[in-house]
Image (cartoon, coloured by chain):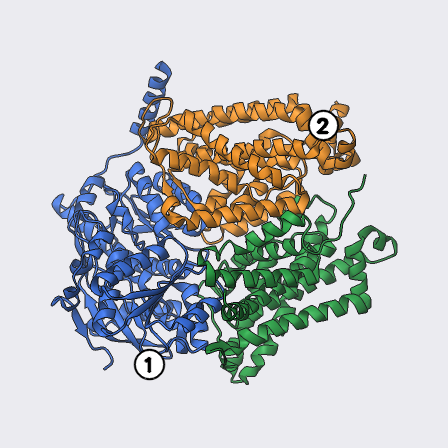
Chain colours: A blue, B green, C orange
């Protein structure tokens, strides 16, 4: 017992010796950012990193946050959950990161939120979407600056029912991993609530990273469902669409690709017109509401110049996370007579925060979940671009499609009424002009 | 299971089986001669795919006939085999032939890790897809189901040609007989004056080229993403072990079994799709511990 | 043996001082020690010349055992959770062992690989039980009856792990020196002769297999508790490959090697990740090649090369192939 007390005292002494005075303005604001730099998900991680580098140098060019320059430290999510957690720890403790941004993968967010709580470091969930994070637990140190899976799948179902009221059968082809199953379950729950007579003819879960969808495509041809839903992304979605298009299956059914926005440019001429596309938020480089918005247009151009590709949703998510960080510091400093805020003051600053990344304003709710508008559109081929772009764009307000505080997403979706399809807060835009 | 389902599943399984055969047969060949389990084999597959896709894009950009993209695949495969495979053999493997098996395996593991990063540095992380080979040949309808000619006919046909070609080379040419001799009994063939370092280099390049060729063919129908090699290694291990290491015909049978097993699973029990290759390998090794086509080897006292 | 003990003691003292000299590194070292236990499992099999390319399975078995028990809210203490993790892993290995120990060399490696990949697929697939790819979170259990905050827990868990590792390492060293353990070396050098002596090499390997799985399970349990999260990738082949990598890095000739190897590996990996987040794999690859080229017996065996270079080049070389047995004899001879 004595030994324990002695050890504890020693620990306390070490802790006390470290400079902990929170209200002093630091020399720099170190931000740890976990993102995929290896493996298949680096299609999201690397654009996210490019965006972070661009936006942080923008922030620093105008003097930093409250006059403090920001320094990012990137951590590779592709190295595995264990290595990630130990890197996260190292960056938060040894590199002195005051804020962490975690992560692209929902699995990694689920693993890291308790770590952030443990390390008592403010943690912005910048891209991951599992609704379980804030519904199964309440976290003090983590906030999410975008929507969750439920709020992303519901608009796709609303759009489908509104624009294609006469379909009867639906098939799902989704990646065989936790997020793929979550997405399909929540989409289907919402769809059944909005259109109770829908019939599910196939639920296929091809292997994550599959190189060959011959069998799945043959089955779809034989079943001829009215609607096919595929929540895949990156290389998996590209492979599926290319192989399906080559066999003429893309025009046989109405396809719903809730994460399709991130593949538009790469799919080129393989993606036909008439496919329903989601964007995990209101992210789209030709967003009709921001045609005249100088900040948006300037960023899209610079991003394209730098990387050779148009920005996709993780880029917009990164912009939202950094905008939230800036806004939270500004707000917290204002309440603190312009002085550098403490950790607690910063966390308070996130409560009810309204901020704007590159597209519409996001609000952080009291349960730390962001309310983000959702954009769904239908592909159309225009001569201006060598790939499909979006038409018949509909914007769904975050407040309408996000599960209310205290409720769980699946039961909430199940009790929705079909009348929601015509909710007056839904905005339809015409983009093809 | 109705006949039509069986037929459709067979057609679906063929192209997949053909692709894994090409990669696995290279692995098997290398093991037969060098006795090395080459983890870097998946990298050859991935790099072959990337190089073929790059060639495809050049051809399109230069305005040449798109039909050139098929011979370009072969060129990519041989190029990768000679350059990447050759360099790997000469700089690394040559130094460790006498050492323990585990060290040999690990050095290819190290090469695999480095090559993963090399792919990222050269080709970035954006998925590549060159769909010329897939779209050029169009589709054919079988029982009301559209199949792409590339997947249904070209891939299996190429696999058959490679199989027959390999058999021919190994049986009827001088080089092939030397390779067979080394596979059968290494020490005896050395004693007969076979220049082992030449045979090793030749075999390694040939095996690497086959993997790269598998990748090049896959580039016509699959997105190329970082990490694509890792999945392929395990699959071709499963094929090679099921077949019996070093068995060329065995690899073809095993690849076909795995391809068909997977597509039948998607029709009848989609949940088993992912574990199918391992289940097949497991069952085969349960009854034939050295693989389907193994010859019995006596342990030396 | 005496020399190994000395090295072990030195390593023990160096590690024990970490929380005082470098408090920020203590979690990292705790993790390295946990992984070291799994590596020790691989080392036991390497004694018999067998490479398991699927020990991730037992590592995951231990980790998920802890995760399920914690989620069941039985209020079990770490001192109970860890033995249970080892027992579950050993039980799986015992059953599967009836099948696995019939294979040798590359087939042994492949059959282990296959089973671990099936387990990996199942952990991903059985989403409702295992949480699929999201994995499971492990709430912090009590340690010896105490419920602690982060700083205290990290401190005490470090010493608990160090104590565990020390006891286990001594036990494994005794096992390897016993006839059962020496038999493993005979499996490696000439199995047929062993059979002629009337010893069942399969049974011998079966015992070693279950033991090595218990070690991997124990390691997985430690990792689950310290990181608070388990995921299917614990059973992925790359993870199993890492264990073999670390075993060679540290040197399979003695039990200390597993832990030295895994600490060095953790350090290399952390530095690689810190200096080049995008290229840590390249750095690991080159260090692995360097080890194999210049110190194929691993870091803890470096002394042989130095000591014997001048006097006994040939026998020292032989120790490569017979894994330290001759090496030790040579060393005694040169004294």
Crowd tier of the residue under label 1, counting other residues whose Cα lies within 10 Å: few below 14, some 14–19, many 20 or above: some
Taking the image as drawn, is residue C36 in sight?
A: no
The part of the image, by quadrant, that contains residue B184 is bottom right
Residue ranking furthest to the front: B2
Q: Secondary structure at mark 2?
A: helix
Residue bearing the label numbered 2? C328
Report the side of A36 relative to B93 (left or right).
Answer: left
Q: Badge 1 is on which residue?
A: A381
Residue located 69% across and 64% down the image: B206
What residue is rendered at 52% in x and 51% in y? C281
Q: Residue at x 28, y 41 (%)?
A: A121
Pointer 2 local density, CA inside 10 Å: few below 14, some 14–19, many at least 20: some
**Relative to B104, is B65 on the left or the right?**
left
- Residue A377 placement (x, y as % from top left): 26, 72
Q: Quadrant of residue A429?
A: bottom left
Q: Are marks 1 and 2 on the same chain?
A: no
Q: Reply above or below: B260 against C176.
A: below
- Number of marks in picture: 2
Q: Nearer the viewer, residue B5 or B295?
A: B5
Compared to C307, does C60 lie above or below? Answer: below
- Tell me the quarter of the image containing the N terminus of chain A: top left
| In front of the other: A281 or A286 | A281
Q: Which circle, 1 or 2, is nearer the viewer?
A: 1
Q: Nearer the viewer, residue A143 or A9?
A: A143
Residue C147, percent across and down?
31, 26
Label 1 resides on the chain identified as A
Give x and y (percent) for residue B138.
Answer: 50, 81
Q: CA distance from mark 1 to mark 2?
A: 75 Å
């Amino acid at each position: 017992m004595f030994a324990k007390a002695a050890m504890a005292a020693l620990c306390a002494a070490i802790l006390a010796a470290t400079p902990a005075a929170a209200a002093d303005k630091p020399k720099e604001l170190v931000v740890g950012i976990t993102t995929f730099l290896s493996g298949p998900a680096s299609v999201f991680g690397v654009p996210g990193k490019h965006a972070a580098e661009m936006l942080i140098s923008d922030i620093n060019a105008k003097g930093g946050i409250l006059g403090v320059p920001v320094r990012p430290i990137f951590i590779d999510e592709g190295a595995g959950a264990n290595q990630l957690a130990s890197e996260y720890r190292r960056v938060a403790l040894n590199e002195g990161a005051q804020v962490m941004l975690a992560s692209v993968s929902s699995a990694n967010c689920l693993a890291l939120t308790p770590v952030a709580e443990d390390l008592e470091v403010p943690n912005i969930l910048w891209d991951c979407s599992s609704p379980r994070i804030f519904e199964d637990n309440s976290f003090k140190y983590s906030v999410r600056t975008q929507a969750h899976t439920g709020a992303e799948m519901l608009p796709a179902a609303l759009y489908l029912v509104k624009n294609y009221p006469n379909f009867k059968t639906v098939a799902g082809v989704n990646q065989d991993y936790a997020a793929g199953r979550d997405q399909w379950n929540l989409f289907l729950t919402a769809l059944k609530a909005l259109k109770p007579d829908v019939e599910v003819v196939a639920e296929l879960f091809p292997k994550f990273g599959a190189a060959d969808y011959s069998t799945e495509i043959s089955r779809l041809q034989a079943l001829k469902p009215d609607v096919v839903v595929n929540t895949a992304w990156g290389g998996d979605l590209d492979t599926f669409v290319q192989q399906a298009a080559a066999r003429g299956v893309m025009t046989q059914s109405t396809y719903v690709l809730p994460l399709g926005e991130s593949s538009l440019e790469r799919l080129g001429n393989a993606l036909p017109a008439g496919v329903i596309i989601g964007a995990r938020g209101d992210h789209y480089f030709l967003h009709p509401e921001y045609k005249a918005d100088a900040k948006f247009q300037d960023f899209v151009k610079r991003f394209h110049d730098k990387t050779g590709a148009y920005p996709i949703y993780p880029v917009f998510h990164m912009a939202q996370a950094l905008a939230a960080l800036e806004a939270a510091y500004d707000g917290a400093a204002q309440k603190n007579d312009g002085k550098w805020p403490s950790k607690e003051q910063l966390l308070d600053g996130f409560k009810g925060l309204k901020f704007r990344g590159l597209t519409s304003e996001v609000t952080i709710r009291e349960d730390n979940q962001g309310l983000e508008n959702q954009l769904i559109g239908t592909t159309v081929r225009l001569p201006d671009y060598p790939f499909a772009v979006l038409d018949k764009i509909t914007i769904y307000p975050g407040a309408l499609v996000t599960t209310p505080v205290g409720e769980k997403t699946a039961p909430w979706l199940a009790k929705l009424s079909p009348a929601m399809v015509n909710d007056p807060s839904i905005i339809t835009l015409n983009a093809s002009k | 299971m109705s006949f039509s389902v069986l037929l459709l599943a067979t057609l679906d399984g063929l192209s997949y089986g053909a692709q894994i055969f090409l990669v696995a047969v290279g692995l098997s060949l290398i093991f037969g001669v060098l006795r090395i389990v080459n983890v870097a084999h998946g990298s050859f597959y991935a790099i072959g795919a990337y190089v073929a896709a790059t060639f495809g894009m050049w051809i399109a950009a230069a305005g040449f006939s798109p039909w050139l993209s098929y011979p370009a695949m072969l060129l990519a495969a041989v190029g990768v085999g000679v350059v990447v495979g050759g360099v790997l053999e000469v700089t690394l493997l040559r130094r460790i032939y006498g050492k323990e098996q585990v060290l040999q395996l690990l050095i290819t593991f190290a090469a695999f890790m480095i090559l993963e990063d090399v792919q990222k540095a050269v080709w970035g992380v954006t998925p590549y897809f060159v769909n010329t080979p897939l779209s050029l040949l169009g589709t054919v309808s079988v029982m009301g189901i559209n199949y792409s000619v590339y997947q249904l006919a070209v891939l299996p046909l190429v696999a058959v040609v490679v199989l027959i070609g390999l058999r021919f080379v190994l049986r009827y040419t001088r080089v092939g007989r030397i390779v067979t001799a080394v596979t059968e009994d290494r020490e005896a063939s050395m004693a007969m004056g076979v220049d082992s370092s030449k045979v090793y280099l030749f075999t390694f390049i040939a095996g690497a080229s086959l993997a790269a060729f598998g990748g090049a063919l896959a580039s016509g129908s699959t997105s190329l993403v970082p990490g694509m090699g890792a999945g392929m290694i395990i699959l071709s291990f499963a094929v090679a072990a099921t077949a019996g290491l070093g068995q060329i015909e065995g690899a073809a049978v095993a690849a076909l079994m795995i391809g068909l097993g997977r597509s039948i699973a998607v029709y009848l029990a989609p949940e088993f799709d992912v574990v199918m290759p391992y289940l097949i390998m497991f069952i085969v090794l349960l009854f034939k511990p050295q693989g389907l086509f193994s010859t019995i080897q006596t342990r030396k006292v | 043996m005496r020399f190994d003990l000395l090295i072990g003691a030195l390593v023990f003292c160096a590690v024990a001082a970490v929380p005082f000299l470098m408090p920020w590194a203590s979690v990292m070292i705790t993790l390295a020690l946990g992984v070291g236990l799994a590596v020790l499992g691989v080392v036991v099999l390497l004694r018999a010349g067998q490479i398991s390319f699927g020990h991730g399975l037992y590592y995951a078995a231990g980790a998920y055992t802890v995760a399920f028990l914690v989620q069941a809210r039985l209020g079990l203490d770490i001192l109970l959770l860890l033995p249970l993790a080892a027992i579950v892993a050993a039980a799986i290995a015992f059953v599967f062992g009836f099948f696995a120990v019939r294979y040798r060399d590359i087939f042994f490696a492949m059959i282990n690989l296959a089973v671990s990949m099936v387990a990996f697929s199942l952990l991903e697939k059985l989403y409702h039980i295992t949480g699929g790819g999201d994995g499971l979170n492990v709430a912090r259990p009590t340690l010896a009856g105490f419920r602690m905050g982060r700083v205290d827990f990290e401190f005490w868990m470090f010493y608990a792990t160090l104590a565990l590792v020390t006891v286990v390492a001594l036990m494994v060293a005794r096992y390897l020196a016993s006839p059962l353990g020496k038999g493993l070396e005979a499996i490696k050098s000439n199995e047929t002769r062993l059979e002629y002596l009337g010893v069942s090499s399969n049974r011998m390997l079966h015992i070693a297999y279950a033991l090595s799985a218990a070690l991997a399970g124990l390691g997985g349990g430690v990792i689950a508790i310290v990181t608070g999260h388990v995921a299917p990738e614990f059973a992925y082949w790359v993870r199993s490959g890492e264990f073999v990598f670390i075993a060679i890095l540290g040197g399979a000739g003695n039990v200390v090697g597993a832990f030295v190897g895994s600490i060095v590996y953790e350090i290399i990996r952390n530095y690689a990740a810190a200096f080049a987040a995008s290229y840590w794999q390249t750095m690991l690859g080159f260090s692995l090649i360097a080890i194999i080229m210049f110190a194929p017996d691993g870091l803890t065996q470096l002394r042989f090369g130095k000591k014997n270079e001048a006097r006994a080049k040939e026998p020292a070389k032989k120790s490569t192939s017979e894994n330290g047995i001759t090496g030790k004899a040579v060393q005694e001879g040169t004294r």
